[in-house]
Image: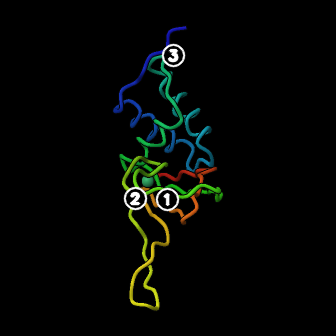
Amino acid sequence: MAYRKPSDTEIVEAIKDALHRHGVVSSQRKLTELVLRELHRHDPDYSVSEVRVRRIAIQNDLVSIEIHGRDSEEKTKAGECPVCGGKTKRLRNLTVYGGTVTQGYKCLACGYWTGLRHRVPTLYVFSPK
Ligand SMILES: [Zn+2]
């Protein structure tokens, strides 16, 4: 079975069409299925991963995303946003001693946040922008 990779532009168009047709999509798997259905109109051999669809949708500002997550035992590391690949920003709070303490991290691109224990995304809800 030969799979072919669509370009970013083709995926952007397919995401727009899928959202236009279906409105709010309540899981990443569902969104990917709908996007693939659009892509297959152009080429039945096209294949795309759920992560690629999610990242392209966020990076191109096509969706508002609601992220559900659960806390893990792992400590959060600063750096790349696990949802969209953007940079996360440290959230700080003032302490009574006049210093600051890190409360967690937030991504400014997609709104993902986590406390000091790594919050694992479990479900995404996509709304057209
Ligand atoms: Zn993000």
Q: Position of residue 104 (x, y in %)?
A: 49, 67
In screen coordinates, is 88 left or right of 114? left
| Amino acid at the residue labelled 1 | Tyr
Q: CA distance from mark 2 to mark 1?
A: 8 Å
Label number found at residue 88 = 2
Label number found at residue 37 = none
Labels 3 & 1 near each other (Cβ < 8 A):
no
Q: Give the structural element (helix, strand or loop) at label 2.
A: strand
Which quadrant would residue 70 be assigned to in this image? bottom right
| Amino acid at the residue labelled 2 | Thr
The residue that label 1 is drawn on is 112
In screen coordinates, is 65 left or right of 100? right
Quarter of the image for the N terminus: give it: top right
Residue closest to the eye, 70 or 92: 92
The residue that label 3 is drawn on is 44
Q: How many marks?
A: 3
Would you place residue 2 above or below residue 58 in this image? above
Disc number lying in front (2 or 3):
2
Q: Position of residue 47 (x, y in %)?
A: 50, 22
Q: Position of residue 32 (x, y in %)?
A: 55, 35
Labels 2 & 1 near each other (Cβ < 8 A):
yes
Sequence order check: which comes first, mark 3 or mark 1?
Answer: 3
Disc 1: residue Cβ within 8 A of ligand 1's nearest atom: yes
Which quadrant would residue 99 be assigned to in this image? bottom left
Please tell me which residue is depicted at 60% across the width and 55% down the height of the picture.
74
In screen coordinates, is 68 left or right of 19? right
Q: CA distance from mark 3 to mark 1?
A: 34 Å
Would you place residue 57 above or below residue 50 in this image? below
Disc 2: residue Cβ within 8 A of ligand 1's nearest atom: yes
Q: Position of residue 96 (x, y in %)?
A: 46, 91
